[in-house]
Image: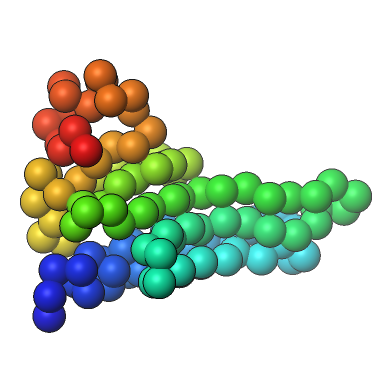
Amino acid sequence: MDKLQQYRQIIRQTLAEQAHPYSYSKDVETEIICDTEHDHYQLAYVGWEEQQRIFSLILHFDIKDGKIWIQYNGTETAIAQVLRDRGVPAYDIVLGFHSPFKRQFSGYAVS
């Protein structure tokens, strides 16, 4: 399996493991969104809780130039470490939610 396919599979597995039912309303769906053509991947809650609209992004990954960009992590899980544990080297993980200046101190890729 080539690296891109492997990274897509790792991201899908990570999203599936982090996808928990929304506990406050049965009318809110947990959605895993995988755009493999453009390599954008998200986990979100979407729906209604009584009269309030719920749209909550939980995780967002992109694959750019052969690297996994963690664009958003709304979990308490150290997602970059999860990726490392699944075989993604630190030099192929970008913490996109940090500024470019701050990334140089993260131990992960700058871009």
Instruction: Determine the residue positioned at 11% across, 44% down.
Output: 90
Instruction: Determine the residue positioned at 66% across, 66% down.
Output: 29
Q: Residue furthest right?
A: 51
Question: Residue 75 at x, y = what percent?
Answer: 44, 43
Question: Residue 81 at x, y = what percent?
Answer: 20, 46
The reply to whether residue 31 is visible in this rendering is yes
Question: Residue 94 at x, y = what percent?
Answer: 24, 41
Q: Is residue 30 left or right of residue 101?
A: right
Instruction: Determine the residue positioned at 73% across, 50% down.
Output: 54
What's the coloring here?
Answer: rainbow
Q: Which of 16 and 109 is in front in this view?
A: 109
| Count of numbered tags | 0
In the rendered view, tell whether residue 10 sits above or below residue 58.
Answer: below
Q: In this view, does 81 lie to the left or right of 26?
A: left
Quadrant containing the C terminus in the rendered view:
top left
Question: Residue 109 at x, y = what percent?
Answer: 16, 38
Q: Which residue lies furthest to the bottom in this view?
A: 1
Q: Quadrant of residue 18?
A: bottom left
